[in-house]
Amino acid sequence: MSKTILTIDDSASIRQMVTMTLMSAGLDVIEAADGAEGYDKATSNVVHAVLTDLNMPVLNGIEFIRKYRQHPSSKGIPIILLTTESDEELKRQAKEAGATGWIVKPFKQDQLLAIIKKVTGA
Amino acid sequence: MNISDPTETFRQEARELLDQLEAGLLDLEQDPSNQDLINSAFRALHTIKGSGAMFGFTAVAEFVHEFETAFDRVRKGQSEPNAALIQVALDAKDHIHLLIESPDTRIDGGDEILAHLRTIVEGGTQAPASKPKAAPSAMAESTIGSTKAWRLVFYLPSDALIYGTNPLLLLEELAQIGPTKVTALTDRIPDLAVIDPEMPHMGWQVDIEAEDPADAIDDVFLFLRDNMELTLTPIDPYEAISDPAAIATAGPAEPDIVEEPIIRAAELAKQAPTPRSRTAEKPDGKAATSLRVPAERLDELMDRVGELVIAQARLSQIAAQSADSGLKTIAEELERLSSGLRDTTMGIRMVPIGSLFGRFRRLVHDLSNELGKPIEFITAGEDTELDKTMIERLADPLVHLIRNSVDHGLESAEKRIAAGKPDKGVVRLSAVYSGAEVAISVSDDGNGLNAARIRAKAEENGLITAESKLTDQELNHLIFAPGFSTAKEVTSLSGRGVGMDVVKRTIDGLRGTIDVTTVAGQGTTMTLRLPLTLAIIDGMLIRVGSGRYTIPLAAVEECVELPDGVEAHAKGRNFLDIRGSLVPYLRLREVFGTTSPQELHQKVVIVSSGEGRVGLVVDQILGNNQTVIKQLTKLHSAVKSFSGATILGDGTVALILDTAHLVSAGQKYVGNQTGRAA
C-alpha cells in the first residue's frame, strides 16, 4: 500500500508543488490549508507522515504540532516542518512540540523526496 | 492558465496576498495598535517570501526578506506604524507586485524603498541582515581524515519514537555510507516491569568502513543531533584486534541478535495508526471550502448549459405541439432541471464585488495624499455578487468615477469648512441588488455638478446650442458625451475628458446603464445598474414583420396596444400618453425597414434605461424565453441596435435588441423628428 502524506500549507502554490512531487513518487497526498484543517484531516485519515508549514492562519505550524501530538493517532507519525527560517529558536520550539524534522524553503523536489524517504522509508 | 502550473498558481496567490497586505496596511493606518493586522500583514509577506523562493522568484524572496526584517520592528512594537511607514510599505508592496509580474525585467528602486523603510523604522542604521549560517557540525571531534573505520555510538532522545523517528531507517541510511556492523547496546534497558515500550531505551553501536563519514553521518542525524547522545571515534585496527570484546561484538553472528529489537522498534512506529478506523481512510467527508478552477472551464460550462437550454427550448416547442402526454411531462421536467442547472452554473461564476472594492481603498488613499484632501472612504455591500467577467470589466469605469468624485466632486478642506461641512470629504462606494440587476453607486458629499458650467462647456464644444432646452437630467448626462470635460485645469488624475464617455461605453457594453443625481452643495451620486450576468438572460420575444427579436425582460416596463388613429399623426409627433406622461416611441418596422404587411393592432413595448423610456412598436408579442446570449462578430459591431443574438427553440436566430441604444436613439429621433434611428 502506498503511503499517504498530509501536506499543510496556506500557500496553494506550495501545496500544489508538494502534491505533484509526492504523487509523482507514487505517494498519496491529502492537502490542508491551515493547521486546524490539518488537524481534522490528520486525525480522520490514515497518514504516514505530515508536512506542515510554520506560518499559517487559524492554527500555525507549531500549534498544530502541539495539538496533533496530543492525539493518540500521532504516535510514531513523522512531522516535517516546511520553514523559510533557518531560525534555530523556531526549530527548537517545533522539536519540543513534537516535530520530527524540517526542510528549509526553498527546497528542490528531490530534496523533499529525500526527506520523505528519510522519515518514512518510502 | 494551465492548472497544473504551480508558478501561475503562485502568481495568482501572490496577487491575492498583496491585495490582502495592502488592505491590512490601509486598515493599520486607521488602527495602528491592532496587533492582528500587523501579524496578518506579516504572514502575507512570509508566504510570498517562502513561495517566491520555491518558484524561482529570487528577487522577490530577497526583497521581501529585507522588507520583513525591517517590518519586524513594527511587529515587535519597537516602531509605530505611522503614515510615512504605511506609505513606504505600500511602495514596497507595489515593488513586489512588479517583481512578480515581470520577473525577467530589471526593476530598480527596491534598494531605495528598503533604505527609506529602514530610515523610518530605526533611523537607517541597520545594514541588510545577513542570513544566519547553518549550525556548526556536531561531528567536530572527527579529525583524522585518513582513518577507514569508525565507531559510532548513539542513543536516541526519549521522545524520538513517539515523534516519528524510525531507528531502522536511520540504520539503513547509515548502511548506505559504507559497510556497517550494528550492535545493540542494551545496557540502559530497564526491568520489564517498568519498561515503557514507547521509549527508545536501547543504544546502537555502528562500526562503519568509510573515509571521513562525519558529514554523511551528520546528515543522517540531521533532525536529532541537537538533543541526542552521539559519539564518533576512529577505530584503531591494532586495538580492535587486541581487544577480544571488540572482535566479538563485530562478529558475523551479531546481526541476528540485533535484528529483532530493530524490527520491534519499527513495528512500534507502524502500530500507531492501527487504532484509527479504516473507514476514515477515504478522503475527509468535509468538503474543501473552495476550489480553484480556470475561468475558461467555467465559460465552457456556461456555453454547454447555454446549448442545453436551447435544446430544451426545442424540445418544449415540439412537446407543445404534440399530444403525447409522456413527452410533455419529460419536457417540463427537463425545463425545470435545465433552469436549475442554469442558475447553479451562473452562481458559480458569481464573485463578491468586495474583491474589487478593496483595490479602490488604495486609490483613494493615494489620491487623498496627492491632492491634500482628507477623505473618508466608505464601502458597503461588499458581499454583493456579480458575474466574474463583469467585475473585471467594471474596474476601470469605477476607477474613473472615484477619481472624478475625489478630484472634481470633493472640495478642498478649506472650502468645505467655509461651507460649514466637516473638513474630511466622504466618498461612498456601495453595491446593492435591485431585481435582476445590481446597482453600484459612487457618491461624494462634495459640491455637486455645476449645471451652469456643464452648459457652458457643452455649448463651447458644440454639443448643444444656446437655444437648446434641456432638463436637469439631460444636462447632467452631457458629461458622458465624448470630449466633454468641465475641470478648468487638467489635473494628472482626471479631467483629460476621455474618462466619462469611456465609462459610459463600457457600461453600455455590459448592457448596463449609468445615472447621475446631484444636489448643489451636497454632492453627486453616480449609479451603475448592471445585469447580474452576461451569459443568459430572460427575454421577451417579439415579432416585427417576419423577423423575431428578443428584448431583455429586465428593461421592459409594460406592454400596451398602439391606440387606433395614432397613425394619422405619425409624421408629426411620435408620443404616447402613458398615464399622463409622454413617452416617445419608435416604429421598429421603420427602424428595420420592414416592408411586409403590418398587423392591424400594433403593440408597444415600453422599455426603459437610465436616461428615460421609449416605446417600441412591434407587430406581435410572442412571449418570454430564456435567452442565451451569443456575441455578434466584429463584422456586425457597427450595427448599433443589437447587442447580440440568440438561438430559438426551432433553431432560428433572433437578434437581441440593445435597449439602451434604442432608448437614446428614440429620444434623439423624436427630438429631431427626422432621420432614422438605426
Image: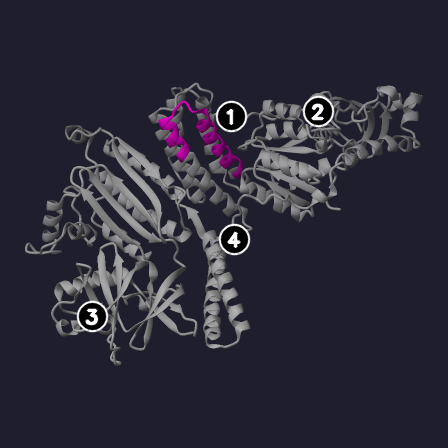
Q: Provide the residue designation for mark 1.
A: B130
Q: Find disc 2 in the rendering and name its residue.
A: B225
Q: Nearer the viewer, residue B201 or B583?
A: B583
Chain under label 3? B
- Of callouts 3 and 4, which one flags the residue occurring earlier in the amino acid sequence? 4
Residue B469 x, y percent position in the rendering:
9, 55
Kindly indicate whether the residues beneath marks 4 and 1 are on one polypeptide chain.
yes
User: Which amino acid type corresponds to the residue marked 1 in the rendered image?
Assistant: Ser
Front label number (2 vs 3): 3
As drawn, B397 above or below B308:
above
Q: Amino acid at mark 4?
A: Asn
State the CA–CA distance, disc 2 to disc 3.
97 Å
Mark 1 residue element: loop
Q: Amino acid at mark 2?
A: Arg
Q: Is residue B180 visible?
A: no
Mark 2: give few (<14), some (14-19) or many (20+) Cα within 10 Å: some
Name the quadrant containing residue B550: bottom left
Q: Residue under label 3, please give it.
A: B563
SS at mark 2 in the image:
helix
| Disc on the earlier residue, 2 or 1 | 1
Residue range corresponding to the magenta coloring: B23-51
How much space separates mark 2 and mark 4, taking CA atoms?
43 Å
Q: Chain of mark 1?
A: B
Name the residue tied to disc 4.
B2
| Mark pair 3, 4: CA separation | 60 Å
Count residues near mark 1 (Cα–Cα under 10 Å), then give few for <14, some for 14-19, many for 20+.
few
Q: Nearer the viewer, mark 2 or mark 4?
A: 4
Q: Does residue B159 appear to the left or right of B451 in the view shown? A: right
Name the amino acid, label 3.
Pro
Q: Does the residue at mark 3 contact the one at mark 4 (Cβ under 8 Å)? A: no
Q: Chain of mark 4?
A: B
